[in-house]
């Protein structure tokens, strides 16, 4: 009861953090680069934040990253931080923070189109309608007379659109490469490597000789500190906490709340103009994003269905096998990925709830997943858990498990609960 009470208190706070803090980083970046050169500001911010997250993840029990993890996070550091964040902050020299936030809000639209192109994941009708609204809103936003007549603003908009493409590509690519189980560790590594690249760009661009400590105002210094502590460490920790406690669909609501916060802060604190056309464009764009992010069919899948046909056969071997949750329906010719693990019987209920919130939702959210079944059997003081996930083909399996798909994907939250797990995963054709 005490844990439930604390969660009722912490979950709303975590949502407030990702809504307000991430929405305010646009204006904080705008303030910071008025006193600190763009790439030095971004590079130093992410280097410091990355080191803090990297260290924090080890305190929470993260495993040491491999050489492949470093190589892959370096690639993501290029797309997410060097091009994506560096370009977006650079563009704030020419465009308002609120307008930039609206353009970046189109990222889910870009990701859906890239998944369609790169993975063959065709969006459903509602998503296609959302894409249409998003495109219309974006066109209305960027074709305003005050933008089209100013060359510098057009350059800024073009760079932000490039950043959105870079983020979108990395977001699709991230599901296909091996990364640390700990999201905090992976983010810290990306920030360290991306920050180092940004800092190097600042040096080569001649920002270091032009940098003057004496010209940093109190507002600029506090903005930089706010970006490091709250924009990176605190907000990311809150985001990671929410992924473990609530459904991904609810967490993704930050996608359309952040630009609203950014618009209001830019207008209220920075005197940024809001035209009727901008507001109408914002409405179209954000409604489109809501339609893209809302997946009612996934919510319907979360209902427990009839027992899995495998249950009677396993029951005959001894012990009672229970089906805790079954999602979706496998197709003939699809691939069943079977993993087994053990927990103490006293930890079984906690493990099953964690599996629903973390393991199942990550699997179902992966393109090519056809369903998941979670089974468990208690014998004495040990509970045996079986996780069966169904996949369209081997490429879909790799999207979820990585190239070395024969190894189990053990999430950080599982590590403190499992007594042991199978060293390899079994794959069978349905």
Image (cartoon, rainbow, N blue to C red):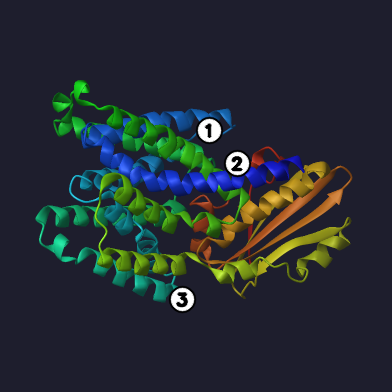
Whole-percent x and y of residue 354? 68, 49
Crowding at label 3, few (<14), some or many (≥20) Cα neighbours within 10 Å? some
Whole-percent x and y of residue 35? 22, 32
Quadrant for residue 356, please give it.
bottom right
Task: Give the mark nearest the N terminus, 3 or 2.
Answer: 3
Task: Give the mark nearest the N terminus, 2 or 1.
Answer: 1
What numbered label is drawn on residue 57? 1
Asked if residue 214 is positioned above or below residue 254 in the image, the reply reads: above
Q: How far apart are marks 2 and 1 (CA)?
A: 10 Å
Using residue 32 as the reference point, say whether residue 168 is left or right of it: right
Q: Distance between the residues labelled 3 and 2?
A: 34 Å
Using residue 140 as the reference point, say whether residue 72 is left or right of it: right
Quadrant for residue 227, please give it.
top left
Do the CB atoms of the residues marked 1 and 3 lie less than 8 Å apart?
A: no
Seen at 83% across and 67% down, the residue is 312
What numbered label is drawn on residue 412? 2
Q: Which of 238 and 320 is in front in this view?
A: 238
Callout 2 secondary element:
helix
Using residue 342 as the reference point, say whether residue 410 is left or right of it: left
Residue 419 showing in the rendered view? no
Point out the frontmost of discs 1 and 3: 3
Residue 252 showing in the rendered view? yes
- Give the quarter of the figure containing the N terminus: top right
Do the CB atoms of the residues marked 2 and 1 lie less than 8 Å apart?
A: no
């Amino acid at each position: 009861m005490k844990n439930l009470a604390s969660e009722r208190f912490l979950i709303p706070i975590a949502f407030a953090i990702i809504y307000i803090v991430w929405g305010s980083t646009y204006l904080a970046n705008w303030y910071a680069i008025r006193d600190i050169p763009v790439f030095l500001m971004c590079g130093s911010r992410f280097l410091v934040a990355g080191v803090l997250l990297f260290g924090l993840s080890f305190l929470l029990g993260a495993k040491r990253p491999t050489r492949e993890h470093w190589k892959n996070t370096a690639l993501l550091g290029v797309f997410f931080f060097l091009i994506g964040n560096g370009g977006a902050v650079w563009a704030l020299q020419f465009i308002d923070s609120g307008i930039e936030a609206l353009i970046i809000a189109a990222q889910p639209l870009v990701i859906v189109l890239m998944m369609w192109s790169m993975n063959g994941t065709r969006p459903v009708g509602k998503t296609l309608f959302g894409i249409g609204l998003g495109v219309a809103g974006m066109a209305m936003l960027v074709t305003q007379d005050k933008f089209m007549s100013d060359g510098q603003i057009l350059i800024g908009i073009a760079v932000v659109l490039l950043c959105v493409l870079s983020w979108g590509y990395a977001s699709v690519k991230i599901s296909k490469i091996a990364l640390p189980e700990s999201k905090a560790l992976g983010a810290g590594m990306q920030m360290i490597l991306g920050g180092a690249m940004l800092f190097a760009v600042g040096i080569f661009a001649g920002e270091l000789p032009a940098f003057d400590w004496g010209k940093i105002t109190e507002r600029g210094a506090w903005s930089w500190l706010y970006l490091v502590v709250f924009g990176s460490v605190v907000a990311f920790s809150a985001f990671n906490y929410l992924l473990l406690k609530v459904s991904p669909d609810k967490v993704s609501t930050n996608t359309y709340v952040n630009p609203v916060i950014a618009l209001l802060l830019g207008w209220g604190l920075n005197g940024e103009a809001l035209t009727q056309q901008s507001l109408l464009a914002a409405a179209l764009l954000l409604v489109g994003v809501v339609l893209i992010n809302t997946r009612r069919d996934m919510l319907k899948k979360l209902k427990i269905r009839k027992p899995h046909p495998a249950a009677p056969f396993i029951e005959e071997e001894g012990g009672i096998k229970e089906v805790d949750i079954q999602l979706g329906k496998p197709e003939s010719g699809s691939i069943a990925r079977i993993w087994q693990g053990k927990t103490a019987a006293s930890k079984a209920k906690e493990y099953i709830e964690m599996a629903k919130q973390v393991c199942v939702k990550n699997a179902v959210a992966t393109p090519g997943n056809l369903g998941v079944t979670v089974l468990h059997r208690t014998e004495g003081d040990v509970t045996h858990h079986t996780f069966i996930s169904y996949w369209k083909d081997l490429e879909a399996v790799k999207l979820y498990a990585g190239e070395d798909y024969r190894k189990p994907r053990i999430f950080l939250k599982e590590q403190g609960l499992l007594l042991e797990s199978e060293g390899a995963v079994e794959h069978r054709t349905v």
